[in-house]
Image: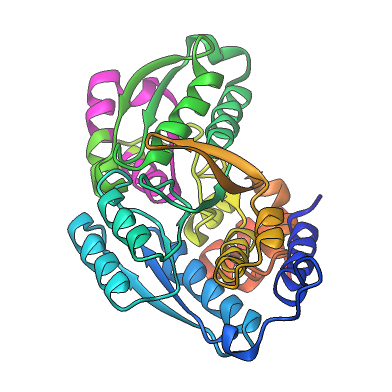
Amino acid sequence: MPVAATLAALSLTGCGVIGATDDGASAPEAKSYDITVGLLLPDTDTARFEKFDYPLIRDRISSLTNKQGKVVYQNAQGSMKRQNEQFKQMVADRVDVILVNAVDSKAIAPAVRKAKEADIPVIAYDRLAEGPIDAYVSHDNELVGQVQGRSLVTALGGKAETSKVVMMNGEPADPNTALFKRGALSELDGKVDIAKAYDTRKWLPEVAAENMRKALKEIGAGNVAAVYSANDGMAGAVIEALEDAGVTDLPPVTGQDADLAAVQRIVAGTQHMTVYKSFLLEATGAADMAVAKVQERSIQFDALARDRIDSPTQEDIPAMLVPVVALTEENIQDTVLDDGVYTVEDICTEDYAADCAKIGLTS
């Protein structure tokens, strides 16, 4: 099912969550719409969090609650300590539910326990948090890595087995990093030569650039056949390092998040692909689940959280896992354009107009 169609189906489900009844119970009273959702996001280096996730969740909460509900938003700017302080403040302020995308999934556990003691539900958003969370909304993150790894093997073709690949993994404290890596290795192991692999502190592009320069020095700029980059921010840094090293025929480089700059690099042919994870589906699902939880609509909550996942501290966590798509130049129209994430004008600026024309991307 196309992402746009999936979103439409989910939106209808969302309407049912808020307006339907549980076993004949009456519709929610007006006062149940007057809710406060705490939203904690991890950083601003990942473009999607500020540009998409926060406004989408804010607007969906408003829509679901007749404009009576509100979102209290904090961004940790990459600081685990700051996020813990923000979380504790939300508990002290008695918000009705907390959506948290953890900077450090393990370090956030004590704060999650404090929320549990205060009877405030906690929903882990995008990254799985430890502690007694009530639910998890994200994507199938192992599948993300599989999609990335498979795309590299396909791009390398018959030369894959002898090709030297550099792996640029994410922040080790992010639980998604291990899932991305596991998925990628399930496709790469035994099929390519993984010459170098790095973890990237706090997902910082400058750290990825530094590690890429090390890899190029040790392997040789002309000997890197492909780069597995776990996200788009690092992919941009990797490509810049390759170009600075004099590589003119760039190897395939993966990414994730469908950042605008990454989509433009795909149009220009400098980035091979990115993984498009529908921000609309994830954010809408999280908002729907948060409101259903606060309004104690268990039937609708369970309908949204049909999947199950385990964390290191908890088993059988209710979860919503949103589908992912490999975005290449062939399906830009069917993904980020049809979903309204970007317009042709956003992508095809003056610097990319000629490249857009080559692949038939016109308004």
Residue 357, given in percent of the width and then of the height, sits at 69, 60
Q: Nearer the viewer, residue 336 or 251?
A: 336
User: Where is residue 344, by image quadrant?
Assistant: bottom right
Q: Is residue 147 above or below residue 326?
A: above
Q: Is residue 358 visible?
A: no
Q: Residue at x 43, y 40 (%)?
A: 176
Residue at 57% over, 42% down: 273
**Colour scheme:** rainbow
Compared with residue 123, is residue 93 higher up or lower down, i.e. above or below?
below
Q: Is residue 342 left or right of residue 190?
A: right
- 23 or 275, which lies in front? 23
The quadrant of the rendering that contains the C terminus is bottom right
| Image: 338 above or below 145 | below
So how many labels did they put on this image?
0
Does 218 appear in magenta? Answer: yes
Residue 317 visible, this orientation: yes
Q: Which residues are magenta?
A: 212-241
User: Where is residue 216 shown, x and y percent of the image?
Assistant: 28, 27
